[in-house]
Amino acid sequence: MIGGLILAAGAATRFGSPKLVAAFRGAPLLQRAVDAMRAVDAIERFVIVVGSDAERVVGAIDAREAEIVVCDRWADGMSASLSAGLAVVNDFDWVIVTLGDQPFVGAAAIAAVAQSAERTGDHVMAVRARYGGRPGHPVALRSQLFPELARMRGDIGARELLKRVVVEEIEADGLGSVPDVDTIADLEALN
């Protein structure tokens, strides 16, 4: 069983306003991540973790089929958001994580990571997309990692843990790309 997790709880301090509701090609930026996750048949259920400006973010998107989780500790960093989301999807064998501010990580990349996770051996603890030889999102995390991920602190996500476990990387060039939106200039350049 594969679940999905979209991390969208940050304050967007470099952006200067709630970036996930900023217009990107006719819709809120976060909507791209939601639509991509929704389009993957292998994802049985998915969660959107919000925090800063939670009501505004949720009100701006079409979140049907998704479960909304409000991370009260969003200011503690990405690990708090990851922990909040994993607490809801802890009954899945795998959870595929994407970020709400990466509009070009689409359904094709999520589906490729899901397929690889379904076929991989028991020794592999994570599957992640690679673009131009560099690791990125989406990342599939095996359930055995959930307890340790829930204990992590700070703004690091799963990066440090993934250095200590077997990770299968799949080439995702042509399936999406990883630029994220941190500033208004980033959004304008991608738009």
Image (cartoon, rainbow, N blue to C red):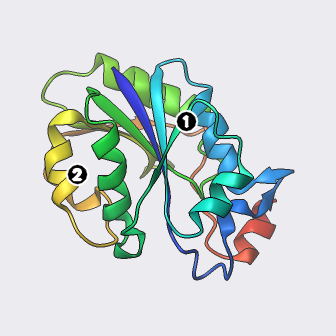
Q: Residues within 10 Å of mark 2 (few under 14, many from 20)?
A: some
Report the amino acid beneath label 1: Ala
Q: Residue at x 31, y 67 (%)?
A: 156
Q: Residues within 10 Å of mark 1 (few under 14, many from 20)?
A: some
Q: Secondary structure at mark 2?
A: helix
Mark 2 or mark 1: name the one nearer the start of the chain.
Answer: 1
Closer to the camera: disc 2 or disc 1? Answer: 1
Tell me the quadrant of the picture where the N terminus can be found.
top left
User: Going by the image, does 177 lie left or right of 31?
Assistant: left
Tell me the quadrant of the picture where the C terminus can be found.
bottom right
Check the image and report above or below for 115 versus 108.
Answer: above
Circle 2 is placed at which residue position? 162
Q: Secondary structure at mark 1?
A: strand
Report the amino acid beneath label 2: Leu
Check the image and report above or below for 14 versus 103.
Answer: below
Using the rendered view, name the quadrant where residue 169 is placed: top left
Q: Position of residue 126 (x, y in %)?
A: 27, 38
